[in-house]
Image (cartoon, grey):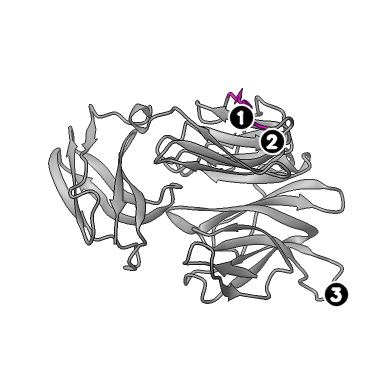
Amino acid sequence: MVVKTTTGGSAWTELYSGGLTRGWCLEYGSMLQGGEWDHDGDYANYKMAISRSVDNGVTWSHHKLNDENGRIHTVAARPDNGNVIYAGGQETYSWHARLFKTEDGGANWTQPGGSVFTNLSSVNAIIIDPVTYDKLLVGTSQGVYISLDGGTSWNVPSLNTTVTAMTIDPTNPNNVFIGTYSGYYFSEDGGYTWTSHNAGLMDNAHITYLDYDAVNHMVYAGTETGGVYRLAYTSDVDDAPSIQPAHLVLHPNYPNPFNGSTVISYTLARDADVTLTICDIRGRTVATLLERFMTAGTGSVVWDGRDAAGNPLSSGVYLCRLQTQGNTDTQKLILRK
């Protein structure tokens, strides 16, 4: 079952019931649910599966990933191509990890990395880098594995610990945060090295959920037995290494906050292929405003507060991201209604 609320939690609406026998995770931005599916109806063999909606939850399709019994713990879809989906979990006979990938919306699945993951006990978290979509970070029972080529090859983690939750700073993807059975770690180099920071946490806090507030630079950690914690993170969007104003500048939009529409201006130091996107605060692309070759100089576009399908977006903070090859600049936009 998947439910939603538009009232801050005081009332809930059922989007769909049935489908997966047990749901273990939900990626609401991509409308993906992962879990177990009693595909044969015998209540004995629960297969690893996902459910997916491409019409904002009106209808759902269900996809068995293979014939092994198991469960899916985490799902993620490429922001620029929702048919490319990754799913990770655990096969429940030998208790080995599984990582799956589809490039056709779920009709066919492969296992990128092969024995890299089948020799582990679980895949618990997947993040697609919000700037470089071929970069994957996969949290496992033995640390964070990184791929720079969409899952073909993988590095060996520098930190050997069970990763139970993971999130990323969408304005600076070098900042990655993980939760473990024994607390919280952060990385400032894209997941290659890690620093522990457990001041204020209960001893051996088992973190089950992490999220990052890119506006207020706060990390939120939900724990199995000790409540919810909040930690200020000092990284600043303006210090992100990926931002290089010498090559491009994304100017503050006007008006900001805005109601209805806002003007977004930019300056390019040289001719380039340009992409200008609007993302939510978790880094998921909701609208693409420019995607073409541009000559050097200053230009502007108007955004009307709608997503790629023309639907009005809700009030909140959004991120405007200007990208050329090797350069990125980001600004915060506040939509008020």
Q: CA distance from mark 2 to mark 1?
A: 8 Å
**Residue 211 x %, y %:** 54, 44
Mark identifier at residue 180: 2
- Which of pointers 2 and 3 indicates the residue nearer the eye? 2
Q: Quadrant of residue 69?
A: bottom right
Q: Amino acid at mark 2?
A: Thr
Mark 2 and mark 1 residues within 8 Å of each other at the beta carbon: yes
Point out the image quarter for the N terminus.
bottom right
Could you tell which of marks 2 and 3 lies nearer the N-terminus?
A: 3
- Label 3: few (<14), some (14–19) or many (≥20) C-alpha neighbours in 10 Å: few
Q: Residue at left 37%, top 31%?
A: 242
Check residue 115 for magenta coloring.
no
- Alpha-carbon distance for marks 3 and 1? 42 Å
Q: Which numbered tag is attached to residue 185?
A: 1
Q: Mark yes or no: residue 193 visible.
A: yes
What secondary structure is the magenta-colored segment mainly?
loop
Residue 164, how many percent across, how many down?
68, 41
Please, what secondary structure does the residue beneath circle 2 have?
Answer: strand
Quadrant for residue 259, please give it. Answer: bottom left
Q: Relative to 302, is 57 on the left or the right?
A: right
Mark 3 or 1, nearer chain start: 3
Local packing at callout 1 (Cα closer than 10 Å; few below 14, some 14-19, many 20+) is some
Horizontal side of 265 relative to 114 (left or right) equals left
Vertical side of 293 occupied by 315: above or below:
below
Q: Nearer the viewer, residue 107 or 75?
A: 75
Is any part of residue 150 visible from this angle? no
Task: Estimate the x, y position of residue 101 in percent, counting from the top left.
Answer: 61, 53
Residue bearing mark 3? 42
Residue span colored magenta: 193-201
